[in-house]
Amino acid sequence: MKCEVIFGITLIHLTFCGIGNVLDVSYWTCLLKKRYSCPDNDIKFYLYTPDDYSYHKPMRKRIDVRNSLALSYSGWDSQKKNVIIIHGFNGTESKTPMTIIRDAYLQRGDYNVFMVDWLPLARFPCYISSLSNTRLLGQCVAQLYAYIMDLGGLAEKTVCVGHSLGAHICGMVSNHLTIKQHKIVGLDPARPLVSQFGSTEFRLSPEDAHQVQIIHTNAGVLGDSHRSGHVNFCVNGGIHQPGCKGHKLRRARCSHFQSACYFAATVRDGSAMIGRLCSDHCPKKSSNWGYLPGKSIPMGHDTPFNARGTYCVTNTGEDDCPFN
């Protein structure tokens, strides 16, 4: 069996690092990038603006970072804030839960919304190649970020929001910037293989922005359990979400999914979810969450910029994503 090392993570063809067959019978049809050149046709950037927003059919415009006029022609407003949203493995920018985050920002009216679509490089069942491809994503999204800054955007008004592998991509963007990002929100950053083999250069860490916020909803299973942010929110114990039912894998996938909708709820209403300071460990495997003295803070969009530590959040499930 042939092994190769790609950007610091050991990849074993046709097996999942000793865990057995990953059902990837068509592995060799997976798209694995071996050259890192941006822009790349398999990585697309779309801009959505509040002025063009319609809930039933939001308008998107493809952004070509080689064209200095693309932003102004697409309705970008330099006076508004910017959010860059990145999906994870087996995701796309045009489906839930990413559209739920997108719509929450557009409904506010004060954000230019950039969506990163890397579906050709992240298709199921190609997790191993998707993991390798995140290196190229970090480089190309950094090009988008620099493009926005060069045309009048401000780092202090720009946030990168990533779900699962997308969270780590937000962090990897920093490898290619000379100025530190202002804020990153990692929505249940991916765990499989990353926690075992990913170095800090290829995973989200507190060094990647002035504020790194993590929302844990399936920590220790599909989501990472490391304290990879300045402020970490452990929702409903951090591992299983109340609205998620069924067999173990379905429950894990559903719980992993919910981080996006919980965050979107805070974009719509900054006080939607409140965190109480608690012990660092997440997930919580008992009913004792280790509450500590200290001020409660809102999770998500309105989290104070200087917040530090781990906060426990109780949610009833009313903000769950639709999950099939």
Image (spheres, helix red, strand yellow):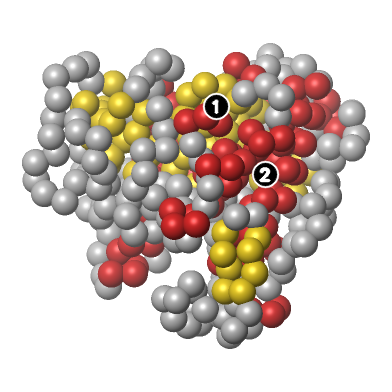
For the residues marked 2 and 1, what is the alpha-carbon distance in whole angstroms?
Answer: 14 Å
Q: Amino acid at mark 1?
A: Ala
- 156 or 8: nearer the eye? 8
Query: What label does residue 209 carry, if any?
Result: 1
Instruction: Judge the density around disc 2: few (<14), some (14-19), many (≥20) Cα neighbours within 10 Å.
Output: many
Q: Secondary structure at mark 2?
A: helix
Q: Secondary structure at mark 1?
A: strand
Taking 296 as reference, is 24 above or below it? below
Residue for badge 2: 138
Q: Position of residue 177 (x, y in %)?
A: 70, 29
Q: Position of residue 187 (x, y in %)?
A: 44, 43
Taking 221 as reference, is 265 above or below it? above
- 298 or 155: nearer the eye? 155
Q: Position of residue 92 (x, y in %)?
A: 60, 56
Q: Is residue 172 left or right of residue 248?
A: right
Answer whether residue 85 is visible to the viewer in this image. no
Answer whether residue 187 is visible to the viewer in this image. yes
Q: Position of residue 197 (x, y in %)?
A: 50, 57
Q: In percent of the image, x 67 and y 50: which residue is there? A: 135
Q: Is residue 36 left or right of residue 259?
A: right
Q: In percent of the image, x 32 and y 55: which residue is there? A: 220
Q: In percent of the image, x 58 and y 46: which residue is there? A: 202
Q: Quadrant of residue 7?
A: bottom right
Tell me the quarter of the image containing the C terminus: bottom left
Of callouts 2 and 1, the N-terminal one: 2
Tell me the quarter of the image containing the N terminus: bottom right
Q: Quadrant of residue 102?
A: top right
